[in-house]
Image (spheres, grey):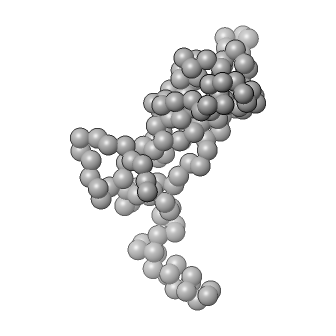
């Protein structure tokens, strides 16, 4: 089962590149563990949906996690700048289980280089390995 974002021009034959993805902020300073602040940080990547229970309860201070509607076709930063220009720092960002979006067929799951339709020789190579 796949969870897909609905829009007025929704077509069952074309998947949206927007998917719910967990964004991690490892070793984030505890004073940033506030839902308003976390949603502000996560909005850099997409529309924030929720934090996980461990983040909300501060039971896992090693990482803050936010579920975000993310466009998986875009490049996203691996770190963001927090604080003022003079007294800030780079915060590491990790995107969990980022799916591959195959823009040729508008589907999640595999890359162009793995497509049997565009590269029929891949099917022959794979069957020859068995």
Q: Is residue 115 visible?
A: yes
Can you give x and y, in whole percent of width and height, for residue 18 in the image? 42, 43
Who's the residue at 37% across and 43% down the image?
Answer: 5
Can you give x and y, in whole percent of width and height, for residue 41 in the image? 57, 23
Query: Which quadrant would the N terminus be assigned to in this image?
Result: bottom left
Examine the rendered structure and indicate whether residue 63 appears above or below residue 111: above
Who's the residue at 43% across and 53% down the image?
Answer: 2
Can you give x and y, in whole percent of width and height, for residue 23 in the image? 59, 36
Who's the residue at 53% across and 35% down the image?
Answer: 67
Examine the rendered structure and indicate whether residue 102 appears above or below residue 41: below
Left or right: where 31 falls relative to 36: right
Residue 33, located in which quarter of the rendered image? top right
Query: Which quadrant would the C terminus be assigned to in this image?
Result: bottom right
* Nearer the observer, 1 or 47: 1
Examine the rendered structure and indicate whether residue 76 appears above or below residue 101: above
Residue 52, located in which quarter of the rendered image? top right
* Nearer the observer, 52 or 73: 52
Can you give x and y, in whole percent of width and height, for residue 6 in the image? 32, 43
Q: Is residue 44 visible?
A: no
Left or right: where 113 falls relative to 106: right
Who's the residue at 42% across and 48% down the image?
Answer: 3
How many numbered circles does the render carry? 0
């Amino acid at each position: 089962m796949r969870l897909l974002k609905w829009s007025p021009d929704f077509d069952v034959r074309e998947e949206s590149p927007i998917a719910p993805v967990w964004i991690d902020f490892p070793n984030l300073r505890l004073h940033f563990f506030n839902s308003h602040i976390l949603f502000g940080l996560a909005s850099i990547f997409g529309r924030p949906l929720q934090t996980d229970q461990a983040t909300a309860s501060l039971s896992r201070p090693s990482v803050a996690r936010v579920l975000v509607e993310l466009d998986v076709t875009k490049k996203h930063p691996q770190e963001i700048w927090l604080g003022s220009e003079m007294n800030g720092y780079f915060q590491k960002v990790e995107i969990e289980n980022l799916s591959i979006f195959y823009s040729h067929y508008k589907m999640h799951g595999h890359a162009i280089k793995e497509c049997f339709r565009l590269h029929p020789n891949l099917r022959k190579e794979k069957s020859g390995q068995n």
